Amino acid sequence: LKLQDPFKFGDASPVIQIDIYEGNIDDDVLFRSIQTTSTETSINLPVNKKYSFAAIYLIKGNTYVAVNSATPGVKYTDSMCDEPCYYTIPRSVNLVLKYTK
């Protein structure tokens, strides 16, 4: 997961909460909730199922949420490895804030 450096926008909490939902966020099926202080965080998810992500930032006393979704899958290749292999796609999800108001 690619996250925003919350201090880019000024006084902020260094902790970013990430809620991961199975399906759409509106379905309200929370799969996992994690907290991080890093701008990049790795998680393992089962493939072939849609997940929605909400990164919650606290900046200057206001709450901002960046959302995105992805359906991790598996692809086969015979050119990226010494022997034919499988790799997961997509490799990252962007949860960077574009701006704050």
Image: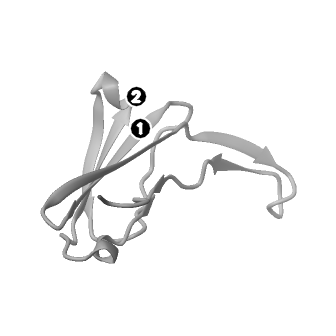
Q: In the image, residue 71 lies at what x, y percent? A: 55, 36
Q: Quadrant of residue 60?
A: bottom left
Amino acid carrying label 2: it is Asn
* Residue extending farthest right: 79
Q: Label 1: state its secondary structure.
A: strand
**x 40%, y 28%: residue:** 24
Say which quadrant the C terminus sits in.
bottom left
Q: Report the label total.
A: 2
Q: Tell me if 10 is positioned left or right of 54 in this view.
A: left
Marks 1 and 2 sit apart, C-alpha to C-alpha, by: 6 Å
* Residue extending farthest left: 61
Amino acid carrying label 1: it is Ser
* Residue extending farthest front: 101
Neighbour tally class for label 1: few under 14, some 14-19, many 20 plus, Cα within 10 Å: many
Could you say which disc has been placed on residue 24 in the image? 2
Q: According to the image, label 1 marks what residue? A: 52
**x 61%, y 48%: residue:** 90
**x 26%, y 53%: residue:** 64
Neighbour tally class for label 2: few under 14, some 14-19, many 20 plus, Cα within 10 Å: some
Tell me if label 1 and label 2 are in contact, CB under 8 Å. Answer: yes
Q: Label 2: state its secondary structure.
A: loop
Q: In the image, residue 96 lies at what x, y percent? A: 43, 60
Could you say which disc has been placed on residue 20 in the image? none
Q: Earlier in the sequence, mark 1 or mark 2?
A: 2
Is residue 15 placed above or below 71 in the rendered structure? below
Front residue of 13 and 44: 13
Q: Tell me if 29 is positioned left or right of 83 in this view.
A: left
State the colouring used for the structure image: one colour
Q: In the image, residue 32 lies at what x, y percent? A: 28, 43
Q: In the image, residue 78 lies at what x, y percent? A: 86, 52
